[in-house]
Amino acid sequence: MTQIMVVDDNEDVAETVSIALNEAGYTATAVHSLDDARRLLSGGNYAGAIIDVWMNEDNGLELASELAQHTPPIPFIIMSGGGPGKTLEQVTARADSIGAVAVLFKPFEDDELLTAVSTMLNA
Amino acid sequence: MTSHPAPPAEKVLEVMEQAGIGHALTDPQGVILYQSEAFSRLGGLSSTPIAGIPWFRLDNASEERKDMRALVWQQFISRKVPWHGIVHWHITEEKIHFYEGTGTHLDDGSIVVVLNDRTSKVLADKKVEDTISFYSQVLRDLPIALAVTDLEGRVTYMNDFLPERLDLTANSFVGKTLSDSFGNGLTELAEREAQNFMRHKDYNEGVTLELQQKDGVGTWLAFARPLFDAKGERVATLNLAIDRSESHRLREEHARLTEAMYEAQKISALNDFAGNLAHELSNILHPVAFYARKLTGDATRAQCTEYSQKINKGVMTAGQILRRTLSLAGRSTDSPEPCDLRAILEETLSSARDLAPNGLEYEAHLPTTPMLAAVSRSGFSQILLNLLNNAAEAMNYAGTVTISLDHVSDNLPGAFADKGMTEAICLRIEDEGPGIDPAIIDRLFEAFVTTKTPGRGVGLGLSVVKGLATSWGGLVTATSLPEKGAAFSVWIPSPSME
């Protein structure tokens, strides 16, 4: 089973993204903070991650950078619905620069999600 | 003048000698045949005439100067007219005396030379000249435009400061009126100031003049002062103008920057506001869309019920966010009127308690009788909701929020005491949260300042509280409590006792 981590402090979003992934045949694990995500990543075997940007005090892009530097690197998708201080374009540029496979803007379609995930897993 | 016999010639000569006026008799070459005592003294000569050398070669002047004198002497001899001039007599090479001299031809061809010591007068005149030249230079170089005008308003003197900026010379203004050059502003000012001075012995403020200069429009602050002679007659006007262009430009620049900064702050605040709204709404919309898609699939009846409930919940939450945003935009709608604050507080607390999760308590210390104040009912209710929400959120919905409502006459805020108030109503709400971050305590009541994590609020609650309280003549204060938590106080003026 291909394991994918979903990181979003908003439980509804984390849950619906996970359901969509599970129904497509992946095993999704939803976590709501960077600390939980780091803890699980150190023990588990994840093929990729889907990470929200604005999470309480946390910045999802930090976790994304860590995944990019992981050995071997863990591919990731960034999702965002906007937030204070940065435009979506700035977030996209930052996500691209640290090697995001795709950037999804909430709300997004299940097809968009699954296309991005299959690109991520073939990367 | 009454007629009187002339004094004896010898006596006159003696008096002149005493007065330091010396005389000598020379031949046509200027060689001294006789010299008086005063003449010897003035010339620094020995008492016996020096044979063969003309008198004008007997000092320590340069040979060049002595040759010049010889030339003048020859002309004097050949023209047979009297000579009158100033002799620069070199006692030493450096030390010079100034003698007023005359030369007169006698019938026998000999010459009478008279020397009168005018050294002190010449030196005094020279000093005056030096002083004038010194001050002229000061005036010319002064960084102030300066012009003296006569009673007809014509320029008799102008320094270079203004002409240089107009690419003209000071001389081109002399003889013209200032009105010709700069319009009537200065001339009218001069007249007004002169009359004012005659009447009140004082001056008014200057006037601002704008002049087209080679480097653009210059702004000048001009003053005019009447000048009087020793008898108190007005003889001229002193016109001064200070170049304010640079400070004027700086002031304009400053105003422009301040405005731009204010705009930038507003835009930045709006951006954050929009960012927060987008964040909250997108987190609601994504699940809503997801469950809407699932309704169209092969969902069971029970799943459809569950999904539509989730969709409904999401839409209602989004609606709540929008209403909160609108209530921030609209502020309070009803105008202040006497309301019972205790009743509003009881009502609000009762619904807050209904909604409170387990572990969140509200402890209220309410007055035993109604407490009237002129506020807007919905406004006071909004204040309570905002402060209670903040308190609950600050302690993560666990712990006790303490609320009190009281008449207070001690330790009134400075702004109240300054107005002579001796009593006020104080609503105080204390939480057991982490207290207030000292970094933002000064800006706490500004819009969009928030300690909440992104997505938990847009930082408008306290600015609304402050805005409402201020509109009733009240104010809001905040403090971190010594142990833990924060306290917010809303101060409202007590209704006046009639």
Image (tube, rainbow, N blue to C red):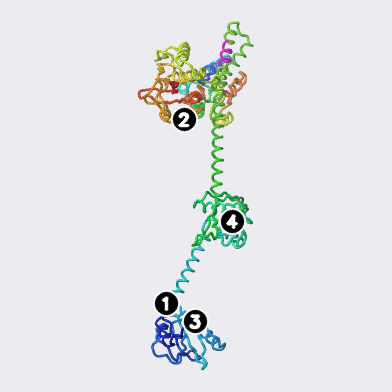
Quarter assignment of residue B181 = bottom right
- Residue A70 seen in the current view: no
Q: Earlier in the sequence, mark 4 or mark 1?
A: 1
| Proximity of marks 4 and 2: CB atoms separated by less than 8 Å | no
Badge 2 amino acid: Arg
| Proximity of marks 4 and 1: CB atoms separated by less than 8 Å | no
> Taking B263 as reference, is B322 above or below it?
above
Q: Nearer the viewer, mark 4 or mark 2?
A: 4
Q: On the rendered structure, is B63 left or right of A100?
A: left
Q: Earlier in the sequence, mark 4 or mark 3?
A: 3
Place of residue B91 in the rendered image (x, y in percent of width and height, measured from the top left): 42, 80
Task: Kindly report the distance in space between the C-alpha atoms of the residues bearing marks 4 and 1.
Answer: 45 Å
Task: Kindly report the distance in space between the C-alpha atoms of the residues bearing marks 3 and 1.
Answer: 15 Å
The residue that disc 3 covers is B65
> Taking B418 as reference, is B151 above or below it?
below
Foreground residue among B492 and B446:
B492
Q: Main secondary structure of the magenta part?
A: helix
Q: Of the numbered discs in the image, which one, if any, rests on residue B260?
A: none
The residue that disc 4 covers is B165
Q: Which residues are magenta?
A: B309-317
Q: Residue at x 42, y 77 (%)?
A: B95
Badge 3 amino acid: Arg
Dot 2 falls on a residue whose secondary structure is: helix
- Please determine if labels 3 and 1 lie on a single subunit: yes
Q: Of the numbered discs in the image, which one, if any, rests on residue B443?
A: 2
Quarter assignment of residue B307 = top right
Which residue is farthest front?
Answer: B2
Place of residue A100 in the rendered image (x, y in percent of width and height, measured from the top left): 56, 28
Q: Residues within 10 Å of mark 1 (few under 14, many from 20)?
A: few
Quarter assignment of residue B335 = top right
